[in-house]
Image (cartoon, rainbow, N blue to C red):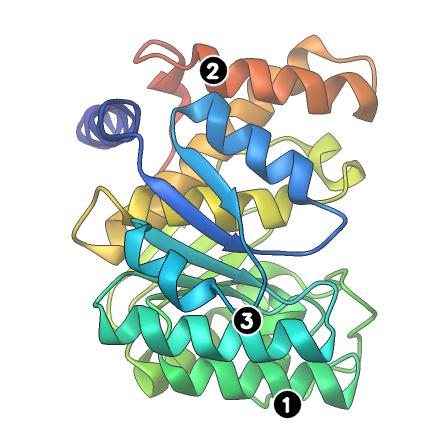
Amino acid sequence: MGDHVRAVWESVQKVRTGQPLVHNITNYVVMNTTANALLALGAAPAMVHAAEEVEEFVAIASSLVINIGTLSSPWITAMRLCATRANELEKPWVLDPVGVGATPLRTRVSDQLAQIGPTVIRANASEVLALAAVSSRHTRGVDSTDPSQAAIEPARQLAQTYKCVVVVSGAVDYVTDGDKLLAVRNGHPMMTRVTGLGCTASALVGAFLAVEPDPLVAAAHAMAVIGVAGEIAGARSAGPGSLQMNLLDALYQLDETALARVRIA
């Protein structure tokens, strides 16, 4: 446990010192939340979506996060261009396939982007099941109605297929590279009452990917950090509104003492 605490704290310090520029193509709902979370932790966010400039912008960014929450044809074009260019430049990138399985468009776009080759796929259990073409009778919009443990084996399969790391978020977050499996047991139940915190987790994964060479480590540390911040915020909050504010404060104030809460196994 102590080794994980020190390692996560070292990652946080790397983000704060390096201030990595995280290029986000993300959805309308969460832009403000994810940008502020990245800033609070110490990274530098950019929300750049125009197909005419994304390839140039990813060249100056440290990492890329693609979130398909609010799809449109111009954004789909930008996502494909940006993901392809990131790979050419060997820049790490995250795919957040929001709502995959809910509509044919989401499923098709998620599959196409996954085939380009993300460094990390972060999704809830239902999304992982859908992306792995495993039957899930409970896919409903962007919410997961499957427990995260139900997607462990499909996540391993996805990681092996796309040669990436897969994060299954839930009450327990599972992180796998297809071989190793880490469980992150941090978070607060109230986090499910604030829109966009899964998307925020993806953005933080992008920040940690910029400073940690091992994507498995980067993803696990990012999930632990947002989970610990959620626990701290949850203890201070009367409801979801104050939790959102307190989460940003917790990310900003995070120190090694607070990270003693980290539970990675």
Q: Residue at x 57, y 13 (%)?
A: 249
The image position of residue 205, as x and y in percent, is: 41, 48
Q: Look at label 1 and name its amino acid.
A: Arg
Q: Residues within 10 Å of mark 1 (few under 14, many from 20)?
A: some
The image position of residue 23, as x and y in percent, is: 44, 51
Residue located beneath label 2 in the image:
252
In the image, taking residue 235 as reference, residue 1 lies left or right, namely: left
Q: Look at label 3 and name its amino acid.
A: Ala
Residue 6 sits above or below residue 56 on the image: above
Q: Are marks 2 and 3 in contact (CB under 8 Å)?
A: no
Q: Earlier in the sequence, mark 2 or mark 1?
A: 1
Q: Which numbered disc covers residue 108?
A: 1
Residue located beneath label 3 in the image:
51
Specify the quadrant that holds the N terminus: top left
Residue 9 sits above or below residue 208 on the image: above
Q: Residues within 10 Å of mark 3 (few under 14, many from 20)?
A: some
Q: Earlier in the sequence, mark 2 or mark 3?
A: 3
In the image, taking residue 72 as reference, residue 180 lies left or right, namely: left
Residue 178 seen by the camera:
no
Disc 3 on helix, strand or loop?
A: loop
Q: Look at label 2 and name its amino acid.
A: Tyr
Disc 2 on helix, strand or loop?
A: helix
The image position of residue 204, as x and y in percent, is: 45, 41
Q: Residue at x 30, y 59 (%)?
A: 59
Q: Residues within 10 Å of mark 2 (few under 14, many from 20)?
A: some
Disc 1 on helix, strand or loop?
A: helix
